[in-house]
Image (cartoon, grey):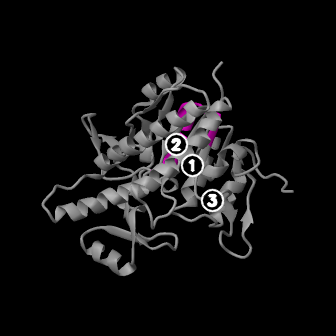
């Protein structure tokens, strides 16, 4: 019998705890911390497939590209940047997990799969770019970039950022390989940064497209396709809140699908940050997933025991105590 399967989605931001100090050494520290938590889950008997975000890392590569362009070095297209970050972040997680598991007396192989995810060429998202990537700018800097043909928008009160199209993930191209490795007991890191966005053109050939897929929605699709028991989304806060940051802020322990939809309709969750996580949780649970949990890296284990985090479960409303 296969143990329970959890898809653990790590935020790209949780690898960069302090945006003012994003150096590689600090990214290693953060990755190791998260890997220790995931290793504890595996030791507790969970089967785990790891996914991760890459927003800040994509930003650094884009920025590097802009600087290098002044020296005549060619640009790196977005699909290749996603592939690059799948490789580099996957490597950090593979190494961190291997070391953490070894310390727990477990010898398991961790492998990263460079994952392509199919989107629809006529997805309306291509007409309306909303997904923030890259560094934060002042409005003045952002407006300058707009003249270079970038789309920019203000992101959750934190500054201005470049935005790109974020089409919905439709299918995971390497799903059979991911499943085969998982069933053989390997720890798989897949769908990094939401997956490399590809379309099938009119003759059926795959092509990368200029977009990024939301990693939480891709993780929900992966969880659904693998029939996971749990989608665990790791983010910057321990619990989801209503009226976030206001005096009447209210932390949520457990919400049903119907409540989650109601809170979205009431506008409680910020577009660039919490909203996609709630939408991903809804996606998974609505399509047969038993439950989703949203919490921060430090609380992964406590959340599995129901002591931390916010659970999203099937059903309409229930009594709040």
| Residue 229, x across and y down, in percent | 65, 34
| Residue 245, x across and y down, in percent | 65, 72
> Which residue sits at x=59%, y=39%?
38
CA gap, disc 3 and disc 1: 16 Å
Q: Quadrant of the C terminus?
A: bottom right
Looking at the image, residue 18 lies above or below residue 7: below
Q: Residue furthest bottom?
A: 140
| Residue 86 occupies quadrant | top left
Viewer-closest of 282 and 214: 214
Residue annotated with mark 2: 219
Whether residue 206 sits left or right of residue 4 in the image: it is: left
Q: Tell me if I can see residue 119 in this picture.
A: no
Residue annotated with mark 3: 237
- State which region is magenta: 214-231
Is there CB contact under 8 Å for labels 1 and 2? yes
CA gap, disc 1 and disc 2: 8 Å
Viewer-closest of 162 and 63: 63
Is there CB contact under 8 Å for labels 2 and 3? no
Could you classify mark 1 by the number of other residues whose Cα lies within 10 Å: few (under 14), some (14-19), or many (20 or more)?
many
Whether residue 84 sits left or right of residue 157 in the image: it is: left
Looking at the image, residue 197 lies above or below residue 158: above
């Amino acid at each position: 019998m296969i143990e329970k399967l959890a898809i653990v989605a790590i935020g790209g931001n949780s690898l960069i705890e302090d945006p003012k100090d994003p150096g590689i050494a600090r990214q290693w520290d953060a990755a190791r911390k998260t890997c220790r938590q995931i290793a504890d889950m595996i030791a507790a008997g969970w089967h785990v497939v790891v996914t991760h975000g890459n927003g800040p890392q994509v930003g650094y590569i884009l920025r590097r590209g802009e600087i290098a362009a002044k020296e005549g070095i060619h640009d790196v297209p977005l699909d290749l940047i996603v592939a690059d970050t799948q490789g580099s972040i996957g490597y950090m997680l593979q190494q961190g997990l291997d070391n953490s598991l070894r310390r727990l007396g477990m010898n398991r192989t961790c492998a990263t799969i460079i994952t392509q995810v199919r989107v629809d060429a006529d997805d309306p998202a291509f007409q309306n770019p909303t997904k923030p990537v890259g560094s934060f700018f002042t409005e003045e800097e952002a407006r300058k970039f707009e003249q270079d043909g970038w789309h920019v928008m203000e992101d959750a009160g934190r500054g201005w950022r470049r935005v790109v199209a974020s089409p919905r993930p439709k299918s995971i191209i390497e799903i059979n390989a991911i499943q085969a490795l998982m069933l053989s007991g390997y720890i798989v890191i897949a769908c990094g940064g939401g997956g490399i966005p590809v379309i099938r053109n009119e003759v059926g050939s795959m092509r990368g497209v200029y977009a990024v897929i939301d990693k939480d929605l891709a993780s929900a699709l992966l969880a659904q396709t693998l029939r996971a028991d749990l989608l665990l989304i790791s983010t910057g806060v321990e619990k989801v809140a209503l009226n976030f940051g206001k005096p009447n802020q209210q932390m949520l322990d457990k919400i049903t699908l119907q409540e989650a939809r109601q809170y979205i309709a009431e506008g409680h969750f910020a577009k660039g940050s919490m909203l996609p996580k709630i939408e991903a949780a809804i996606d998974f649970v609505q399509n047969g997933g038993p439950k989703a949990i949203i919490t921060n890296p430090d609380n992964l284990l406590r959340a599995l025991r129901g002591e931390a985090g916010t659970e999203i479960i099937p059903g309409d409303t229930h009594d709040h105590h």
